[in-house]
Every structure is written in C-alpha cells, then in structure tokens.
Amino acid sequence: MRLSHPPLRSTRRNKFGVIRPLPDIQAFIAGEHERAVGVERLARRRRVKALEMLEGALDAARSGLAADEPAPPARGRR
C-alpha cells in the first residue's frame, strides 16, 4: 500500500537539506485537513516569542532607568 501525500509548499534549502514550514509538516503527518492546526500553532509560537522578546526589552529598559545613570541627551531638531 502506497500513501499519497500532497506536494509540500514553500520549502527552503540549506546545506543540511530542506526546511519545511510547520503547517506543511502537520499536513504531511496528520493529513491535509490538519494544515490549519499547523498554521495556528506556528502563529501562536510566533506570538509567544514576540512577547518574550518585548518583555526582555522592557526589563532591560527598566533596569537601565533604575541604575541611576543619567539619561542621554535628547536628540531633536533645534
């Protein structure tokens, strides 16, 4: 018995082989009807990563303000 899978979309190559997006992997493993699940998982992962990065930047800004360092002079038009 041979399994037939739809062709995978938007692949990229690097020196190790092909990099496939998560929705393509999800569709390949669980079937094309599960592609939407992969899309949502990827979007959720990207949102979490973005929030982590923003929280880190906010913490760094807060610690810089609390370090009693004088603020740099504002650059603006004269």
Image (spheres, rainbow, N blue to C red):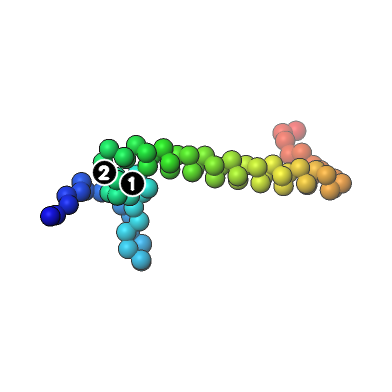
- Disc 2 secondary structure class: loop
What's the amino acid at mark 2?
A: Gly
Residue at the far bottom: name it. Answer: 15
Residue 77 placement (x, y as % from top left): 72, 33
Labelled pair 2, 1 in contact (Cβ < 8 Å):
no
Q: Nearer the viewer, residue 71 or 41?
A: 41
* Residue beneath disc 1: 26
Identify the image quadrant of residue 2: bottom left
Residue at the extreme right of the image, as rendered: 68
Residue 32 is situated, as x and y percent measured from the top left of the image, at: 26, 41
Q: In which quarter of the image is the N terminus?
A: bottom left
Q: Please give the name of the residue rendered at 60% of the width and 45% of the height, measured from the top-left corner.
A: 53
In screen coordinates, is 69 left or right of 40? right
Q: Residue 34: give x, y in percent of width and height.
A: 31, 40
Check disc 1 and give the amino acid type: Gln
Give the answer, above or below, for where 18 lies relative to 62. below
| Residue 10 in view (yes/no) | no
Q: Name the side, left or right, on which 75 lies relative to 19.
A: right
Q: How crowded is mark 1: few (under 14 residues within 10 Å), some or many (20 or more)?
A: some
**Residue 31: assigned label:** 2
Q: Quadrant of the C terminus?
A: top right
Residue 52 is situated, as x and y percent measured from the top left of the image, at 60, 44
User: Residue drawn at (17%, 49%), measured in percent from left and top?
Assistant: 4
Secondary structure of the residue carrying tag 1 is helix
Asked which quadrant contains residue 43, the reply is: top left
